[in-house]
Image (tube, rainbow, N blue to C red):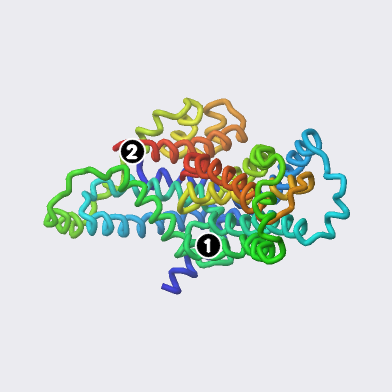
Amino acid sequence: MAELEDELASLMRTAQAGDAAAYRRLLSALADMLRRWVRRELARQGYEIAEAEDIVQETLLAIHLKRGSWDPDRPILPWLRAVTRHKLIDNLRRRGRRIMVPVDDIMETLAAPEPEDRLSAEALDRHLATLPPGQSQVVRAISIDGLSPSETAKKLTLSEGAVRVALHRGLAALSRAAQRSEP
Amino acid sequence: MKTDDLITSLVADQTRPPARTGQILAILLPLSLTVSLLIFVAELRMRPDFLTALGSWRYIFKFGTAGSIALFGLVLLLQLARPEQSLRRGFLWLPLALAPLLLSIVLEFTMLPADQWAASAIGYYPLYCLTLVPLISLAPLVAALAAMRRGAPQSPMTAGAIAGFAAGGFGAFIYSMHCDNDSPFYVAIWYFSAILIVTALGAVLGRSLLRW
Protein backbone atom coordinates (compact mmCIF):
# COMPACT_ATOMS: atom_id res chain seq x y z
CA MET A 1 0.00 0.00 0.00
CA ALA A 2 2.79 2.40 0.91
CA GLU A 3 4.51 1.60 -2.39
CA LEU A 4 1.33 2.31 -4.35
CA GLU A 5 0.82 5.56 -2.43
CA ASP A 6 4.35 6.75 -3.20
CA GLU A 7 4.14 5.74 -6.84
CA LEU A 8 0.80 7.43 -7.51
CA ALA A 9 1.68 10.53 -5.51
CA SER A 10 4.97 10.99 -7.30
CA LEU A 11 3.33 10.44 -10.70
CA MET A 12 0.72 13.09 -9.86
CA ARG A 13 3.37 15.55 -8.68
CA THR A 14 5.43 15.02 -11.83
CA ALA A 15 2.28 15.32 -13.94
CA GLN A 16 1.28 18.57 -12.27
CA ALA A 17 4.72 19.92 -13.05
CA GLY A 18 3.76 19.49 -16.71
CA ASP A 19 5.01 15.97 -17.57
CA ALA A 20 2.42 14.60 -20.02
CA ALA A 21 3.89 11.08 -20.12
CA ALA A 22 3.69 10.79 -16.34
CA TYR A 23 0.10 11.97 -16.43
CA ARG A 24 -0.83 9.37 -19.03
CA ARG A 25 0.82 6.62 -16.99
CA LEU A 26 -1.00 7.79 -13.88
CA LEU A 27 -4.42 7.90 -15.57
CA SER A 28 -3.93 4.49 -17.21
CA ALA A 29 -2.94 2.94 -13.89
CA LEU A 30 -5.90 4.61 -12.21
CA ALA A 31 -8.27 3.39 -14.94
CA ASP A 32 -7.23 -0.20 -14.22
CA MET A 33 -7.57 0.24 -10.48
CA LEU A 34 -10.90 1.98 -10.81
CA ARG A 35 -12.24 -0.68 -13.13
CA ARG A 36 -11.47 -3.44 -10.63
CA TRP A 37 -12.78 -1.43 -7.72
CA VAL A 38 -16.00 -0.23 -9.39
CA ARG A 39 -16.84 -3.71 -10.65
CA ARG A 40 -16.26 -5.22 -7.24
CA GLU A 41 -18.34 -2.51 -5.56
CA LEU A 42 -21.19 -2.83 -8.07
CA ALA A 43 -21.22 -6.58 -7.69
CA ARG A 44 -21.08 -6.38 -3.90
CA GLN A 45 -24.08 -4.09 -3.84
CA GLY A 46 -26.03 -6.21 -6.29
CA TYR A 47 -25.93 -3.91 -9.30
CA GLU A 48 -25.19 -4.99 -12.82
CA ILE A 49 -21.62 -4.30 -13.80
CA ALA A 50 -22.32 -3.66 -17.49
CA GLU A 51 -22.02 0.08 -16.97
CA ALA A 52 -18.88 -0.07 -14.87
CA GLU A 53 -16.84 1.52 -17.65
CA ASP A 54 -19.18 4.55 -17.75
CA ILE A 55 -18.50 5.06 -14.06
CA VAL A 56 -14.76 4.56 -14.59
CA GLN A 57 -14.77 7.25 -17.28
CA GLU A 58 -16.81 9.68 -15.22
CA THR A 59 -14.49 9.14 -12.28
CA LEU A 60 -11.40 9.73 -14.43
CA LEU A 61 -12.98 12.99 -15.60
CA ALA A 62 -13.64 13.99 -11.99
CA ILE A 63 -10.09 13.11 -10.92
CA HIS A 64 -8.79 15.26 -13.77
CA LEU A 65 -11.08 18.25 -13.18
CA LYS A 66 -10.69 18.17 -9.39
CA ARG A 67 -6.96 17.35 -9.24
CA GLY A 68 -6.37 20.79 -7.74
CA SER A 69 -8.22 19.69 -4.60
CA TRP A 70 -5.43 17.22 -3.81
CA ASP A 71 -2.91 18.77 -1.47
CA PRO A 72 0.53 17.46 -2.60
CA ASP A 73 1.67 17.44 1.03
CA ARG A 74 -0.97 14.86 1.90
CA PRO A 75 -1.33 11.21 0.86
CA ILE A 76 -3.07 10.72 -2.47
CA LEU A 77 -4.84 7.41 -1.86
CA PRO A 78 -7.41 8.79 0.60
CA TRP A 79 -8.08 11.60 -1.88
CA LEU A 80 -8.53 9.13 -4.75
CA ARG A 81 -10.78 6.95 -2.63
CA ALA A 82 -12.92 9.95 -1.68
CA VAL A 83 -13.31 11.14 -5.28
CA THR A 84 -14.12 7.61 -6.47
CA ARG A 85 -16.60 7.05 -3.68
CA HIS A 86 -18.30 10.38 -4.43
CA LYS A 87 -18.71 9.50 -8.10
CA LEU A 88 -19.86 5.96 -7.36
CA ILE A 89 -22.51 7.15 -4.90
CA ASP A 90 -23.60 9.81 -7.39
CA ASN A 91 -23.95 7.13 -10.05
CA LEU A 92 -25.74 4.61 -7.89
CA ARG A 93 -28.17 7.31 -6.83
CA ARG A 94 -28.94 8.01 -10.48
CA ARG A 95 -29.06 4.38 -11.48
CA GLY A 96 -30.83 3.45 -8.26
CA ARG A 97 -33.84 1.59 -9.45
CA ARG A 98 -32.33 -0.85 -11.88
CA ILE A 99 -32.91 -4.56 -12.11
CA MET A 100 -30.45 -6.56 -10.12
CA VAL A 101 -28.73 -9.41 -11.91
CA PRO A 102 -28.55 -12.79 -10.21
CA VAL A 103 -25.39 -13.26 -8.19
CA ASP A 104 -24.22 -16.20 -10.31
CA ASP A 105 -24.03 -13.98 -13.38
CA ILE A 106 -21.93 -11.49 -11.54
CA MET A 107 -19.43 -14.11 -10.47
CA GLU A 108 -19.23 -15.32 -14.04
CA THR A 109 -18.63 -11.87 -15.47
CA LEU A 110 -16.09 -11.13 -12.81
CA ALA A 111 -14.21 -14.29 -13.54
CA ALA A 112 -14.32 -13.93 -17.32
CA PRO A 113 -11.37 -12.11 -18.89
CA GLU A 114 -12.44 -8.79 -20.36
CA PRO A 115 -12.27 -8.49 -24.13
CA GLU A 116 -10.57 -5.26 -25.23
CA ASP A 117 -13.68 -3.69 -26.74
CA ARG A 118 -15.47 -3.74 -23.39
CA LEU A 119 -13.15 -0.99 -22.25
CA SER A 120 -15.22 1.49 -24.18
CA ALA A 121 -18.46 3.00 -22.93
CA GLU A 122 -21.39 4.71 -24.55
CA ALA A 123 -22.47 7.36 -22.07
CA LEU A 124 -19.79 9.95 -22.83
CA ASP A 125 -20.54 9.76 -26.57
CA ARG A 126 -24.17 10.53 -25.80
CA HIS A 127 -23.17 13.49 -23.63
CA LEU A 128 -20.69 14.66 -26.24
CA ALA A 129 -23.61 15.15 -28.63
CA THR A 130 -25.25 17.60 -26.18
CA LEU A 131 -22.24 19.94 -26.06
CA PRO A 132 -21.95 23.15 -28.08
CA PRO A 133 -20.63 22.13 -31.53
CA GLY A 134 -17.30 23.92 -31.10
CA GLN A 135 -16.51 22.09 -27.89
CA SER A 136 -17.63 18.65 -29.05
CA GLN A 137 -15.63 19.00 -32.29
CA VAL A 138 -12.48 19.78 -30.34
CA VAL A 139 -13.02 17.02 -27.75
CA ARG A 140 -13.70 14.51 -30.54
CA ALA A 141 -10.68 15.54 -32.57
CA ILE A 142 -8.34 15.20 -29.60
CA SER A 143 -9.81 12.11 -27.92
CA ILE A 144 -11.21 9.95 -30.70
CA ASP A 145 -9.09 11.10 -33.65
CA GLY A 146 -6.04 11.42 -31.43
CA LEU A 147 -4.91 14.78 -32.85
CA SER A 148 -2.68 17.08 -30.84
CA PRO A 149 -4.07 20.49 -29.87
CA SER A 150 -1.97 22.16 -32.58
CA GLU A 151 -3.14 19.70 -35.26
CA THR A 152 -6.71 20.25 -34.09
CA ALA A 153 -6.21 24.00 -34.36
CA LYS A 154 -5.00 23.64 -37.95
CA LYS A 155 -7.84 21.30 -38.90
CA LEU A 156 -10.57 23.52 -37.44
CA THR A 157 -8.79 26.80 -38.38
CA LEU A 158 -8.71 27.98 -34.79
CA SER A 159 -5.87 29.30 -32.67
CA GLU A 160 -4.22 26.76 -30.40
CA GLY A 161 -5.32 28.80 -27.41
CA ALA A 162 -8.95 28.60 -28.53
CA VAL A 163 -8.60 24.82 -28.91
CA ARG A 164 -7.24 24.50 -25.37
CA VAL A 165 -10.05 26.60 -23.95
CA ALA A 166 -12.68 24.63 -25.90
CA LEU A 167 -11.12 21.36 -24.75
CA HIS A 168 -11.17 22.36 -21.10
CA ARG A 169 -14.71 23.74 -21.25
CA GLY A 170 -15.84 20.68 -23.21
CA LEU A 171 -14.44 18.27 -20.61
CA ALA A 172 -16.06 20.23 -17.77
CA ALA A 173 -19.36 20.27 -19.69
CA LEU A 174 -19.09 16.51 -20.28
CA SER A 175 -18.74 15.95 -16.56
CA ARG A 176 -21.78 18.13 -15.85
CA ALA A 177 -23.83 16.41 -18.56
CA ALA A 178 -22.99 13.05 -17.01
CA GLN A 179 -24.26 14.24 -13.64
CA ARG A 180 -27.58 15.32 -15.11
CA SER A 181 -28.10 12.21 -17.18
CA GLU A 182 -30.65 9.51 -16.48
CA PRO A 183 -29.36 6.15 -17.63
CA MET B 1 -15.67 6.46 -26.34
CA LYS B 2 -12.74 4.31 -25.40
CA THR B 3 -11.27 4.94 -21.99
CA ASP B 4 -7.83 5.34 -23.59
CA ASP B 5 -9.20 8.05 -25.87
CA LEU B 6 -10.68 9.86 -22.91
CA ILE B 7 -7.29 9.69 -21.19
CA THR B 8 -5.69 11.20 -24.30
CA SER B 9 -7.94 14.23 -24.03
CA LEU B 10 -7.33 14.56 -20.29
CA VAL B 11 -3.58 14.49 -20.88
CA ALA B 12 -3.94 17.18 -23.56
CA ASP B 13 -5.88 19.32 -21.08
CA GLN B 14 -3.18 19.06 -18.40
CA THR B 15 -0.97 22.05 -19.11
CA ARG B 16 -0.29 23.78 -15.84
CA PRO B 17 -1.25 22.98 -12.28
CA PRO B 18 -4.87 23.92 -11.64
CA ALA B 19 -5.68 26.77 -9.27
CA ARG B 20 -6.59 25.72 -5.76
CA THR B 21 -9.49 26.90 -3.64
CA GLY B 22 -7.11 28.68 -1.26
CA GLN B 23 -5.36 30.53 -4.09
CA ILE B 24 -8.63 31.69 -5.64
CA LEU B 25 -9.89 32.76 -2.24
CA ALA B 26 -6.72 34.76 -1.59
CA ILE B 27 -7.50 36.82 -4.69
CA LEU B 28 -11.31 37.00 -4.60
CA LEU B 29 -11.83 37.57 -0.89
CA PRO B 30 -10.01 40.94 -0.68
CA LEU B 31 -11.82 42.06 -3.84
CA SER B 32 -15.19 41.05 -2.45
CA LEU B 33 -14.51 42.76 0.88
CA THR B 34 -13.72 45.95 -1.03
CA VAL B 35 -17.15 45.69 -2.65
CA SER B 36 -18.71 45.13 0.79
CA LEU B 37 -16.91 48.18 2.18
CA LEU B 38 -18.15 50.27 -0.76
CA ILE B 39 -21.71 49.17 -0.01
CA PHE B 40 -21.10 50.08 3.62
CA VAL B 41 -19.82 53.54 2.67
CA ALA B 42 -22.74 54.12 0.30
CA GLU B 43 -25.50 52.92 2.62
CA LEU B 44 -24.25 53.41 6.16
CA ARG B 45 -21.86 55.46 8.24
CA MET B 46 -19.49 54.67 11.06
CA ARG B 47 -21.10 55.10 14.46
CA PRO B 48 -20.01 58.51 15.78
CA ASP B 49 -18.59 57.12 19.03
CA PHE B 50 -16.58 54.41 17.26
CA LEU B 51 -13.27 55.07 19.03
CA THR B 52 -14.75 55.35 22.52
CA ALA B 53 -16.87 52.26 21.88
CA LEU B 54 -13.71 50.30 21.14
CA GLY B 55 -13.00 50.60 24.86
CA SER B 56 -16.12 48.64 25.84
CA TRP B 57 -15.93 44.88 26.25
CA ARG B 58 -19.32 44.42 24.60
CA TYR B 59 -18.21 46.14 21.43
CA ILE B 60 -14.96 44.19 21.33
CA PHE B 61 -16.88 40.94 21.76
CA LYS B 62 -19.21 41.90 18.94
CA PHE B 63 -16.21 42.19 16.61
CA GLY B 64 -14.78 39.03 18.14
CA THR B 65 -17.98 37.09 17.48
CA ALA B 66 -18.19 38.18 13.84
CA GLY B 67 -14.44 37.85 13.31
CA SER B 68 -14.17 34.34 14.67
CA ILE B 69 -17.19 33.18 12.66
CA ALA B 70 -15.54 34.62 9.53
CA LEU B 71 -12.11 33.19 10.36
CA PHE B 72 -13.06 29.71 11.54
CA GLY B 73 -15.70 29.57 8.83
CA LEU B 74 -12.91 30.06 6.30
CA VAL B 75 -10.71 27.43 7.95
CA LEU B 76 -13.60 24.96 7.87
CA LEU B 77 -14.40 25.91 4.27
CA LEU B 78 -10.84 25.20 3.12
CA GLN B 79 -11.02 21.81 4.83
CA LEU B 80 -14.30 20.97 3.14
CA ALA B 81 -12.73 21.74 -0.25
CA ARG B 82 -10.80 18.47 0.15
CA PRO B 83 -13.01 15.46 -0.54
CA GLU B 84 -11.21 13.17 1.92
CA GLN B 85 -11.89 15.53 4.83
CA SER B 86 -14.53 13.95 7.02
CA LEU B 87 -17.37 16.34 7.80
CA ARG B 88 -17.46 15.35 11.44
CA ARG B 89 -13.80 16.19 12.02
CA GLY B 90 -14.18 19.45 10.11
CA PHE B 91 -17.02 20.49 12.34
CA LEU B 92 -14.79 20.33 15.41
CA TRP B 93 -13.94 23.92 14.44
CA LEU B 94 -17.49 25.08 14.96
CA PRO B 95 -17.37 25.43 18.79
CA LEU B 96 -14.25 27.58 18.35
CA ALA B 97 -16.08 29.80 15.87
CA LEU B 98 -18.88 30.35 18.37
CA ALA B 99 -16.70 30.65 21.49
CA PRO B 100 -16.65 34.50 21.67
CA LEU B 101 -20.42 34.65 21.25
CA LEU B 102 -21.10 32.06 23.96
CA LEU B 103 -18.58 33.60 26.32
CA SER B 104 -20.03 37.09 25.90
CA ILE B 105 -23.57 35.81 26.51
CA VAL B 106 -22.47 34.29 29.80
CA LEU B 107 -20.75 37.55 30.76
CA GLU B 108 -23.83 39.58 29.88
CA PHE B 109 -26.06 37.38 32.04
CA THR B 110 -23.82 38.14 35.01
CA MET B 111 -23.19 41.85 34.29
CA LEU B 112 -26.59 43.13 33.16
CA PRO B 113 -29.54 43.48 35.61
CA ALA B 114 -32.36 41.13 34.64
CA ASP B 115 -34.85 43.92 34.04
CA GLN B 116 -32.70 45.23 31.16
CA TRP B 117 -32.30 41.89 29.37
CA ALA B 118 -35.38 42.18 27.17
CA ALA B 119 -34.70 45.77 26.11
CA SER B 120 -31.05 45.12 25.20
CA ALA B 121 -31.99 41.95 23.33
CA ILE B 122 -34.44 43.78 21.11
CA GLY B 123 -32.29 46.89 20.68
CA TYR B 124 -32.95 49.50 18.02
CA TYR B 125 -33.84 48.79 14.38
CA PRO B 126 -33.10 45.04 14.42
CA LEU B 127 -34.66 44.64 10.97
CA TYR B 128 -31.96 46.92 9.64
CA CYS B 129 -29.39 44.42 10.86
CA LEU B 130 -31.34 41.50 9.39
CA THR B 131 -31.31 43.04 5.91
CA LEU B 132 -28.00 44.89 5.77
CA VAL B 133 -25.75 42.13 7.12
CA PRO B 134 -26.91 39.72 4.38
CA LEU B 135 -26.60 42.50 1.78
CA ILE B 136 -23.01 43.27 2.81
CA SER B 137 -22.28 39.52 2.89
CA LEU B 138 -23.30 38.88 -0.71
CA ALA B 139 -19.93 39.74 -2.27
CA PRO B 140 -17.87 37.52 0.08
CA LEU B 141 -20.45 34.76 -0.44
CA VAL B 142 -19.91 34.93 -4.19
CA ALA B 143 -16.14 34.85 -3.64
CA ALA B 144 -16.34 31.85 -1.30
CA LEU B 145 -18.61 29.90 -3.65
CA ALA B 146 -16.46 30.71 -6.69
CA ALA B 147 -13.37 29.49 -4.85
CA MET B 148 -15.15 26.35 -3.68
CA ARG B 149 -16.01 25.44 -7.25
CA ARG B 150 -12.31 24.56 -7.54
CA GLY B 151 -12.66 22.22 -4.61
CA ALA B 152 -14.32 18.83 -4.34
CA PRO B 153 -16.58 18.98 -1.30
CA GLN B 154 -18.20 15.71 -0.19
CA SER B 155 -21.44 17.54 0.45
CA PRO B 156 -22.03 20.52 -1.86
CA MET B 157 -24.89 21.77 0.30
CA THR B 158 -22.84 21.74 3.50
CA ALA B 159 -19.93 23.42 1.74
CA GLY B 160 -22.30 26.12 0.45
CA ALA B 161 -23.71 26.59 3.95
CA ILE B 162 -20.24 27.07 5.43
CA ALA B 163 -19.38 29.50 2.62
CA GLY B 164 -22.47 31.46 3.68
CA PHE B 165 -21.57 31.18 7.37
CA ALA B 166 -18.08 32.61 6.79
CA ALA B 167 -19.40 35.30 4.43
CA GLY B 168 -22.04 36.23 7.01
CA GLY B 169 -19.25 36.60 9.57
CA PHE B 170 -17.47 39.09 7.30
CA GLY B 171 -20.71 40.95 6.65
CA ALA B 172 -21.45 41.15 10.39
CA PHE B 173 -17.91 42.36 11.10
CA ILE B 174 -18.27 45.24 8.66
CA TYR B 175 -21.79 46.08 9.79
CA SER B 176 -20.53 46.26 13.41
CA MET B 177 -18.68 49.46 12.54
CA HIS B 178 -22.07 51.12 12.06
CA CYS B 179 -24.35 49.42 14.55
CA ASP B 180 -24.55 50.65 18.15
CA ASN B 181 -26.52 47.75 19.62
CA ASP B 182 -23.68 46.13 21.51
CA SER B 183 -25.37 43.74 23.92
CA PRO B 184 -24.33 40.11 23.34
CA PHE B 185 -28.05 39.29 23.60
CA TYR B 186 -28.70 41.49 20.58
CA VAL B 187 -25.75 39.95 18.74
CA ALA B 188 -26.91 36.43 19.55
CA ILE B 189 -30.42 37.07 18.27
CA TRP B 190 -30.14 39.50 15.36
CA TYR B 191 -26.58 39.21 14.09
CA PHE B 192 -26.67 35.47 14.39
CA SER B 193 -30.02 35.28 12.57
CA ALA B 194 -28.61 37.47 9.81
CA ILE B 195 -25.61 35.14 9.53
CA LEU B 196 -27.97 32.16 9.42
CA ILE B 197 -29.87 33.79 6.55
CA VAL B 198 -26.61 33.99 4.58
CA THR B 199 -25.81 30.40 5.64
CA ALA B 200 -29.15 29.20 4.27
CA LEU B 201 -28.64 31.13 1.04
CA GLY B 202 -25.17 29.57 0.70
CA ALA B 203 -26.62 26.09 1.26
CA VAL B 204 -29.22 26.57 -1.47
CA LEU B 205 -26.68 27.99 -3.93
CA GLY B 206 -24.04 25.42 -3.00
CA ARG B 207 -26.37 22.52 -3.65
CA SER B 208 -26.42 23.31 -7.34
CA LEU B 209 -23.24 25.36 -7.88
CA LEU B 210 -20.85 23.07 -6.00
CA ARG B 211 -22.07 19.75 -7.42
CA TRP B 212 -19.38 17.77 -9.13
Q: Is A137 situated left or right of A181 in this image?
A: right
Furthest residue in direction bottom, as rendered: A2
Q: Please report, as a chain letter, where disc 2 is located.
A: A
Q: Amino acid at mark 1?
A: Gly
Residue B101: assigned label: none
Say which of B89 and B173 sits in front.
Answer: B173
Residue A123: assigned label: 2
Q: Position of residue A174 (x, y in %)?
A: 44, 37
**Quadrant of the drawing holding the N terminus of chain A:** bottom left
Q: Look at discs 1 and 2 and give the one toward the viewer.
A: 1
Furthest residue in direction front, as rendered: B115
Q: Position of residue A105 (x, y in %)?
A: 13, 53
Q: Residue at x 20, y 54 (%)?
A: A46
Q: Amino acid at mark 2?
A: Ala
Say which of B97 and B125 sits in front.
Answer: B125
Q: Please report, as a chain letter, where disc 1 is located.
A: B
Q: Is residue B15 above or below residue B102?
A: above
Q: Report the residue marked by disc 1.
A: B90
Q: Position of residue A116 (x, y in %)?
A: 27, 49
Say which of B49 and A3 sits in front.
Answer: B49
Residue A122 in view of the camera: yes
Q: Is residue A34 above or below residue A5?
A: above
Q: Residue at x 74, y 45 (%)?
A: B175
| Crowd tier of the residue under label 1, counting other residues whose Cα lies within 10 Å: few below 14, some 14–19, many 20 or above | some
Q: Residue at x 58, y 36 (%)?
A: A165
Say which of B189 and A176 sits in front.
Answer: B189
- Assign a secondary structure to mark 1: helix
